[in-house]
């Protein structure tokens, strides 16, 4: 089974923390908890984390701020925001702050577990994975090593979040093939129900900002107007 995965819960409502802890531990995860944003940020810097569940409304520092700060410091740990259903914009704010996904409150445990599994960090030395090693890919100034999760641009490492990397890897498996947002939502985020397509758009935008010379005029992560997105390797 390997080392248990560690999840940090950043949430100020005790009752929610307890129910999350109980259910995650039942599934074999190790949990850590922070009850405010400042503590969440400090604990979020722990390199041993495999995922962070991050509430938005928190004392001291809100969840967007914590997420943005961790990303600015180069932490690529998967972050799933816990947003309030009535706050529609929270979804997009969270993604723009660098979150990988979100789940709206109130959520069912089944929903939560599905989101946790779909976003969990997949380490280089994942136990039980027997995937044959893949040759690195060169696309323009981009160098992508699928085995070590390393992406460099002009020789400089690019820090991608788990979902940004997953998305890039998905595109690379079929350069030139156009994928609809629905397909990307299903294949990259593992949504088996209708997810919010803005998740795809915001992640595409973030990926472009990191890998393109001019994100406004991309030459790798391309838009096929009215259809979807595709990768161009030239
Ligand atoms: Ca809260």
Image (cartoon, rainbow, N blue to C red):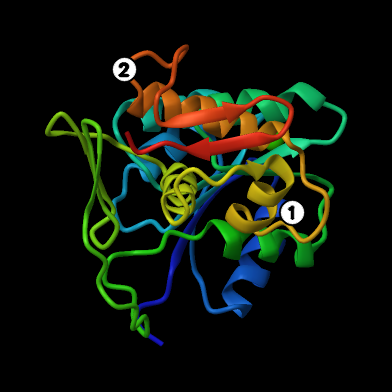
Q: Quadrant of residue 76?
A: top left
Task: Report the number of numbered marks.
Answer: 2
Q: Mark 1 points at which residue?
A: 15
**Element assignment for label 2:** loop
Q: Where is residue 134 in the image (x, y as percent from the top left)?
A: 26, 66
Q: Quadrant of ligand 1?
A: top right
Task: Pick the residue in front: 110 or 197.
Answer: 197
Up the image or down, 103 lies above or below 97; here it is: below
Q: Left or right: where does residue 89 sit relative to residue 21?
A: right
Q: Quadrant of residue 200?
A: top right
Q: Which mark is residue 231?
A: none
Residue 60 seen in this snapshot: no
Q: Which residue is drawn at 72% across and 53% down?
A: 16
Query: Does ligand 1 reach within 8 Å of label 2's beta carbon?
Result: no
Q: Quadrant of residue 57?
A: top right
Q: Where is residue 84 in the image (x, y as percent from the top left)?
A: 79, 35
Of the two numbered discs 2 and 1 on the same chain, state the one appearing first in sequence: 1
Crowding at dot 1, Cα within 10 Å, few <14 / some 14-19 / many 20+, comes out as: few
Q: Which residue is drawn at 54% across and 35% down?
A: 36
Q: Position of residue 109 (x, y in %)?
A: 77, 65
Crowding at dot 2, Cα within 10 Å, few <14 / some 14-19 / many 20+, comes out as: some
Q: Left or right: where does residue 138 sit relative to residue 112?
A: left
Q: Left or right: where does residue 32 sit relative to residue 105?
A: left
**Screen quadrant of the C terminus:** top left
Nearer mark to the viewer, of 2 and 1: 2
Task: Pick the residue in front: 62 or 205.
Answer: 205
Task: Pick the residue in front: 137 or 200.
Answer: 137
Outermost residue, right side = 86
Q: Mark 2 points at which residue?
A: 213
Task: Pick the residue in front: 155 or 227.
Answer: 227
Q: Where is residue 38 in the image (x, y as percent from the top left)?
A: 45, 30
């Amino acid at each position: 089974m390997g080392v248990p995965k560690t999840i940090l819960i950043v949430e100020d409502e005790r009752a929610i923390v307890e129910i999350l802890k109980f259910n995650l531990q039942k599934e074999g995860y190790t949990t850590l908890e922070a009850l405010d944003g400042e503590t969440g940020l400090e604990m979020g810097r722990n390199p041993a984390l495999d995922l962070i569940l991050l509430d938005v409304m928190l004392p001291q520092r809100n969840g967007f701020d914590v997420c943005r700060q961790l990303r600015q410091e180069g932490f690529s740990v998967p972050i799933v925001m816990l947003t309030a259903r009535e706050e529609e914009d929270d979804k997009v704010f969270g993604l723009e702050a660098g979150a990988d996904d979100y789940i709206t409150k109130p959520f069912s445990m089944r929903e939560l577990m599905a989101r946790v599994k779909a976003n969990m960090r997949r380490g280089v030395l994942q136990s039980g994975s027997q995937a044959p090693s893949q040759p690195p890919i060169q696309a323009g100034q981009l160098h992508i090593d699928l085995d070590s999760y390393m992406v460099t641009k002009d020789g400089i490492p690019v820090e991608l979040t788990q979902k940004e990397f997953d998305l890039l890897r998905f595109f690379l498996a079929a350069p030139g093939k156009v994928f609809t947002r629905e397909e990307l939502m299903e294949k990259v985020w593992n949504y088996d129900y209708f997810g919010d397509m803005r998740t795809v758009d915001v992640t595409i935008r973030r990926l472009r900002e990191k890998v393109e010379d001019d994100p406004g005029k991309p030459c790798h992560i391309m838009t096929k107007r009215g259809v979807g997105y595709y990768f161009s390797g030239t």
